[in-house]
């Protein structure tokens, strides 16, 4: 029997509407029975697509005051963390310094900054350099193909082979002196979608059936699920596969909703049910 006693620090944007980013992560870790603390890198009235221009709030001053308070608490100790979307270099530098100060067993960083071969609008080379510095403190990073290209400085096509991805992973780890596990997400293979990653010197694939369409929050959900399962001491391959399946469950349920509702984020019902069922089974509670 495995008894979990984890406290997870979540640093990513907070959308006040829907099931995205920090909101989704908090729900996932609650289903795992984990205590959470959240550092919202930016507060938005809605997500940035489908609702017009959202009202935003810069949180840098609050982040400093919150962490100063936390540092004074003897009974607040974090065992793992995730960093998702940040949005500006000052916040990213603050997170680098604060997370470097913590003694975390696992730190997953999703370097959200681009897709489909280019950096997101509003980001520049300075932001890229900040993220390149930040990911060096991670134990796991989860870039998509574009983000791996940006981090490494190596060109990768969207349909790059496993071998090409593996070579760039190895080069990035060597050049950055990092021991982080690199999971390249959103890779399509033979009618499926999933991730390519290196574990114990072997290149591996974990995937699920491909569902066409655009779905918001899949990366946020994958990160939370992966860290949640790893906190139960599952082996890495099993944790990755279970996280992939959890995202597939959410996407498959979301496809049943009207197109107009997808901008609110993923339907997490089945994913959270399976996490809660897993957690109760691990702790010996009734399922």
Image (cartoon, rainbow, N blue to C red):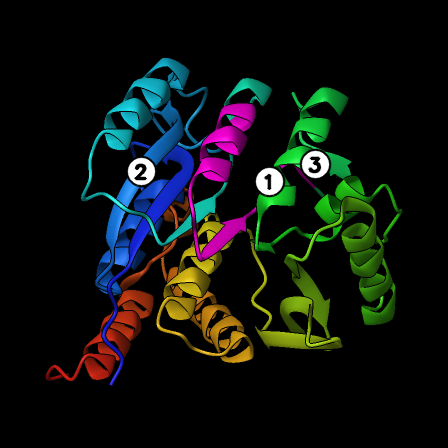
Q: Which residue lies under the disc numbered 1?
A: 112
For the residues marked 3 and 1, what is the alpha-carbon distance in whole angstroms? Answer: 11 Å
| Residue 131, quarter of picture | top right
Label number found at residue 252: none
Foreground disc of the pair 2, 1: 2
Residue 59 x, y percent position in the rendering: 37, 19
Q: Secondary structure at mark 1?
A: loop
Image point (32%, 48%), residue name: 78
Q: Which residue is mark 2?
A: 38
Question: On the image, which quarter does residue 79 sit in?
Answer: bottom left
| First-in-chain label (2 vs 1) | 2
**Where is the C terminus found, in terms of image quarters?**
bottom left
Q: Tell me the number on the disc at residue 132.
A: 3
Which residue reaches farthest left? 286
Q: Position of residue 83 (x, y in %)?
A: 48, 42
**Residues drawn in magenta:** 92-114
User: In the image, is 145 to the left or to the right of 264?
Assistant: right
Q: Is residue 79 left or right of residue 177?
A: left
Left or right: 52 with respect to 25?
Answer: right
- In this rendering, the answer to whether 182 lies above or below 40 is below
Q: Position of residue 22 (x, y in %)?
A: 35, 42
Spatial CA span between label 3 and label 2: 23 Å
Asked whether residue 159 is in view, the answer is no
**Separation (CA) of disc 2 from disc 1:** 18 Å
Q: Label 3: how many residues lie within 10 Å, few (<14), some (14-19) or many (20+)? A: some
> How dense is the environment of label 2, judged by Cα within 10 Å: few (below 14), some, or many (20 and up)?
many
Which residue occupies the foreground of this view, 143 or 191?
A: 143
Label 2 sits on a secondary structure element that is: strand
Residue at point 59%, 21% (across, down): 89
Query: What percent of the width, then of the height, locates residue 73?
Result: 20, 34
Query: Residue 53 colored magenta?
Result: no
Upstream in the sequence, badge 3 or badge 2? Answer: 2
């Amino acid at each position: 029997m495995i008894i979990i006693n984890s406290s997870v620090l979540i640093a990513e944007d907070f959308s006040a509407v829907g099931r995205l980013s920090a909101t989704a992560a908090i729900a996932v870790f609650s289903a795992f029975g984990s205590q959470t603390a959240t550092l919202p890198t930016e507060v938005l009235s809605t997500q940035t697509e489908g609702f017009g221009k959202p009202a935003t709030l810069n949180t840098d001053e609050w982040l400093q005051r919150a962490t100063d308070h936390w540092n004074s608490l003897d009974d607040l100790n974090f065992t793992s963390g995730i960093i998702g979307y940040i949005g500006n270099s000052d916040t990213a530098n603050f997170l680098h310094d604060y997370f470097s100060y913590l003694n975390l067993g696992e730190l997953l960083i999703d370097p959200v900054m681009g897709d489909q071969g280019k950096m997101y609008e509003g980001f520049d080379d300075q932001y890229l350099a900040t993220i390149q510095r930040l990911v060096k403190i991670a134990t796991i990073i989860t870039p998509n193909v574009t983000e791996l290209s940006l981090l490494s400085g190596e060109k990768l096509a969207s349909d790059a082979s496993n071998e090409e991805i593996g070579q760039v992973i190895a080069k990035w780890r060597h050049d950055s002196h990092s021991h982080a596990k690199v999971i390249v997400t959103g890779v399509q293979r033979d009618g499926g979608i999933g991730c390519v990653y290196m574990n114990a010197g072997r290149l591996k694939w974990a995937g699920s059936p491909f569902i066409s369409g655009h779905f918001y929050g899949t990366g946020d959900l994958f990160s939370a699920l992966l860290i949640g399962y790893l906190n139960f001491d599952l082996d890495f391959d099993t944790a990755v596969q279970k996280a992939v399946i959890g995202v597939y469950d959410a996407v498959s349920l979301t496809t049943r909703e009207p197109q107009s509702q997808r901008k609110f984020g993923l339907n997490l019902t089945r994913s959270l049910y399976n996490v809660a069922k897993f957690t109760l089974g691990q702790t010996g509670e009734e399922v």
